[in-house]
Amino acid sequence: MNVASCMKHHVVSIPASTTIREAAALFVKKHIGLLPVVDKNDKPIGAIGIHDLLKLEMPDFVNFVMDVDFVHDFGAVEDTRPPAATLNKTVRSLMRPIITVDEDCGLLRAYSLMLQQNLHDIPVVSKDGKLIGIASRVDIGVTILKAWEKAE
Amino acid sequence: MEMVSIVLAFVIFFGSLILIFWEKINRSIVAISGAVLMIGMGKVLGFYNEELAIEAIDFNTLGLLLGMMMLVAMLEPTGFFEYLAVLAARSSKGKPIRLFILLGIITTILSMFLDNVTTVVLIAPVTILISEILGISPLPYLMSEALLSNVGGVATLVGDPPNVLIGSAAGLSFNDFLLYSLPIVLVSWAGALLTLRILFKKDLSKRPRRTKAVMKLNPAETLNHPQTARQILIVLGMAILFFFIHHALHVEPSLIALGAAAVSLLWIQPDLQEVLKRVEWSVLIFFGALFIMVGGLEHSGALRKIVNLFDTVTGMDPVLFGVLVIWIVAIFSAVVDNVPITIALIPVIQGLGESGMDIAPLWWALAFGAGFGGTGTIIGSSANIIVATLSEKTRMPITSGIWIKRGLPVMIVTCTIASILYALAFPLF
């Protein structure tokens, strides 16, 4: 079994010129967690995850205070929004290197890669490097478990 | 031959100092290399050797620092520091000026007995938390914490490393510091607080958006190990009591600090590896290596030559000379680390004493200059560097420009107050 057998073929992707505001709207509209950033030839050049956007609103103290359990109310932070200047920037400033797998990549290999790199979705590329699909942990996980039905 | 030794010792010592101030190579690595070179050259030329080097190390200073570091290392994970900061936030009811004063007082008191860096490292994250949930800028609080911990540390024998060094070299007791340094520091501290209050007027007059959130913080929940915190605080309290009478008991402060560390270790029996990991060994090594280098400088005869350079000052008005020492040491401490400055100046002052000068007041001038000078610039003290580094990971990084606008006035105000009081109190020293 390879990753192509369980991936979603319809991938929502964006060019690097998309603004952060537009990307955020797309996350909302499509209800997804990862947006691959592609060039003109549909080749992935980076990725932006929902977490990368949420980080813009996260308070600084969560990076310093080990255990935020005693903070019962985040107060002013709860309704802080990123400034317009940030939202109007392109995703190029925020995107990170993309980790992809080839379409014939094995399921366990793909799953391990996601665990180690802490990814929830992994984009799949064809032999010539074009983005052709995307698979989530659940997509891959249930496909692996399906094989258990045939187990003795 | 003697001239060669003097020149060589001089070159090794000042070469190392320049490299330390350069900050391209870790200061402890420079110090170790310099110390080894000094002993090696000393052996070749016959002015220094291993035994003399060991003798040159002030183990009293190292023991005091190590003991206090181990106590703090055990107190750190209990959440006690966070507890105090949260308590301050609640008592302030979210009012900026009250919060500013309360956090300032807590940092000052802690830094009078504990290491400034530890105090700031532990209070600053909670400060960022408090200001974020209030919806106000953390800048005035963070900077004041660093600046006031520098100022407060000057008040006691154990408050900051230059004081430990001076106390040990000059044989000054814990009470001597309370008697001669604390009153002057109190006035200077009030001056510093007022200066900061004026400089941050705009930030502090902004109304917090959400004061209620602060009231929902529960200090008790920040204490991860209340029992351990209580035990260490009891031991620390006992240690401070013993500091008051160490002179009468003829006991060195280092024995008290190491004793307190030993009692805590026995009582709590923590994971020793974890405790030792939190001890700043590189600082202790840095001190040890500097002592060895200064020892070499002394035995080569180079120090004598430096002291002779000061011959002209013996005729100078002693009050004016002391005030000059405050300012010169302060200016140096503002741009470079005050520890090597203090370690290098101690034998110079001792030398001046041998040539007949009354040096008792000069020790205080050195302490004030080294302590208050550190507030001037972002690199003036370790506490400043820590706060600045921490702020770089937030949305409001503190740049050296921002620092100098507030830090330099604080340095000038505190040094001016110290100079005036020094001159007034001169007959008492």
Image: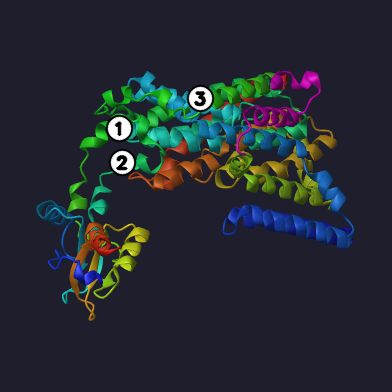
> What residue span does the magenta drawing correspond to?
B242-271
Q: In this view, does B189 lie to the left or right of B308?
A: left
Q: What residue is rendered at 58% in x and 47% in y?
A: B336
Q: Name the residue under label 3.
A: B226
The answer to whether marks 2 and 1 mark residues whose Cβ atoms lie closer than 8 Å is yes
Classify mark 1: helix, strand or loop: helix
- Percent position of residue B365, x then y: 66, 32
Residue B49 lies, with reference to residue B235, above or below; the image says: below
Residue B320 visible in the picture: no
Closer to the camera in the image, B282 or B207: B282
Residue B3 lies, with reference to residue B364, above or below; the image says: below
Which chain does tag 2 point to? A
Q: Is the magenta stretch mostly helix, strand or loop?
A: helix
Classify mark 2: helix, strand or loop: loop
Q: Mark 1 points at which residue?
A: B133
Residue A12 lies, with reference to residue B394, above or below; the image says: below
Disc 2 marks which amino acid? Pro
Asked if the stretch drawn in magenta spans residue B269, the answer is yes
Closer to the camera in the image, B206 or B33: B33
- Work out how far the residue at label 2 is from the one at label 1, CA to CA, in angstroms: 9 Å
- Rendered-image quadrant of the C terminus of chain B: top right
The answer to whether marks 1 and 3 mark residues whose Cβ atoms lie closer than 8 Å is no
- Work out how far the residue at label 3 is from the one at label 2, CA to CA, in angstroms: 28 Å
Tell which tag, 3 or 2, sits nearer the viewer: 3
Which chain does tag 3 point to? B
- The numbered dot on residue A59 is 2
Classify mark 3: helix, strand or loop: helix
Which chain does tag 1 point to? B
Disc 1 marks which amino acid? Ile
Closer to the camera in the image, B34 or A17: A17
- The numbered dot on residue B386 is none
